[in-house]
Image (cartoon, rainbow, N blue to C red):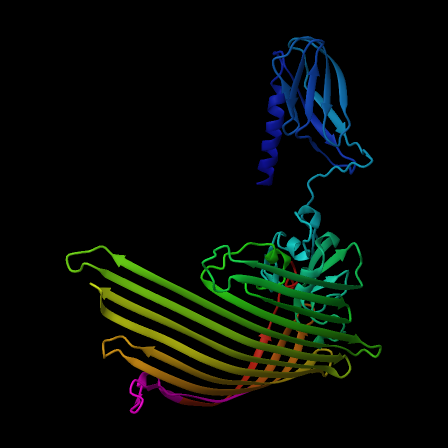
Amino acid sequence: MKKFISIFLLLYITLPINAQDKTNELSGFIIHKQENGSNGSLDGANIFLIYAKDTLKTTSINGVFRFKPIKTGKAKLIITAIGCRKVEKELNIIAGKNSNLYIEILDESIQLEEVTIKGRIPIVTQNGDTLIFNPKAVNIQEGDVAMNIVEQLPGTETDDHSVKIMGKQVTKTYIDGRLIFGSDPMAALKNLSATDVLKIKAYDEYENTKTKKLMYRGDLTRVLNIETKSKLISSWKAHLLASTGSNMDSKNDRGKFRKGLGLTTNFFSEKFLLTSNVFHNNINRKSNNIKNVLSISDPGSTYNETTYADLATERSWDTENGTYGTFRAFYTFGYNRDNTNTRSEQHYFPGNNYQQRLYEEQNSNSDRKQNHYSEFSFSNSNDKWGEFRWNQLITYNNNKDWQSLYIYNEENNLQTSKSLMHYDNLNKNFHVKEDISYVNSITDRIGYTLESSVDINKGKNHSLRIDTLESSTTQTYLTIPSKLRNTEWNGNAQLIYILNPENDTQISFDYSVKYENGWKHQFAWNMLSPTNPQTDEANTYSYKINNLTQKQEVSFHFFSLSKNKL
């Protein structure tokens, strides 16, 4: 295929040049001799054929140019192209005797003061297994951060919480080779100014780059390394946002006054970071992002009130005796309240069966959510005695929602039907999870892992459902309390033998045990007759769980030598 293409191009260049023998025309071929030693045809050069009283102009295509028809006599040929020296050639044109011209044009280095000439900048290049992205090849605006650059790069997938490069999720973001913004890869992308970015490199490295032991290095993960102009050592940032306003629709009295207040403070360095973020508003704003503040939104029939706060800290250490580790703590609080009220009336024209008819519907919804989330983690490693990790996660949710639907029908000023459907639900949930693991090596290729985790869920729910549709067969007044508790414990022991350290081929022997114990009780009564409540069997049930599972497994993991290629 390559040979065929080469011959075709050669014919395309040669045939027009050889067809010039007996006509008043002038043709030629321009070869571009570059400073790096490579030669090639020059496309897009401007060619001028200047007579005493006339000037002809054309442009080269794949290095070929042609003037037809032309006058005989003396003329000057001038060729210009961006970045090349100008070529001038005196000609004496004779009918039917003009040979094809072969013209060489050379590069010209021009240094201009206060003038910048921009060509097409490649957005990505590759050096071995590393992709190098050039931020100058994308569009950035004042106030943009590194994330706004990454979003425009080829081969990337982004959302608010993660970035993928060539289909693989990024786990770390270095700044000039250091974790200035901590272990969260998104922290650097969301806080580093886009104007400070020189290059963005993407490549694969093992999870633990500080160890010399094969057993502790972990899996290959994708990382970013951002080269900056400022060569950051630490970063401190704070901003306060406040806004007020009102609904443009004066008829909407509910939440007519709109407000928003937010505060963000961040300190980042390679060994320590502390961040906080707090906001409260009733304008459907979900963050302290300045772009959300400078916007116009329609609150509609929904009244929303949001309060959010988070606090995070991270401390890392690397001692002279080879011990290194990290402690992280994170806490968030969220409160969200939504209220929606709608009312509609439908009046009908008189018909054969009625002189007047009215249909009225009122719908009210309220949703309140309160969430607490905390996470603590600790890791400490040493190549001599192994790696220890601990992680704790605690969540508490307190949610309440209700819905009320009222329907009224009237004909000839008399009520024909009326119904009320009401749903009220209160849900509380507590969840705690603890994970502990220890990894150690017996030899450079043989090691073991011990893991244990406990997961506890507690829940309490109470709901009320009322349906007063006038048909007696559908009238219900259900009260449904329920409780649940579930505890799950997992233990795992693993023996690993690394067969090939070059591509992580390994064989492992695993023994795991899982114990689960839990129960849920839910009861439902129809309270339509308070003195004689009836059990609602469709919503009443109770069950218990008590399971013990043991599993032995032998696994063979093989990876090709190109697993770390981008």
Identify which residue, 146 or 531, lies in the foreground: 531
At 36% across and 79% down in the image, what residue appears?
Answer: 465
Residue farthest front in this picture: 413
At 51% across and 61% down in the image, what residue appears?
Answer: 256
- Quarter of the image with the C terminus is bottom right
Above-or-below relation of 53 to 564: above
Q: Quadrant of residue 180?
A: bottom right
Could you tell me residue 61's position as x and y percent? 63, 28
Could you tell me residue 35's position as x and y percent? 79, 36
Q: Quadrant of residue 67?
A: top right
Could you tell me residue 545's position as x and y percent? 45, 89
With 13 as the anchor, is 350 left or right in this view? left
Q: Which range is magenta? A: 513-542
Q: Is residue 138 magenta?
A: no
Residue 224 makes an appearance in the image: no
- Quarter of the image with the N terminus is top right
Identify which residue, 353 or 52, lies in the foreground: 353
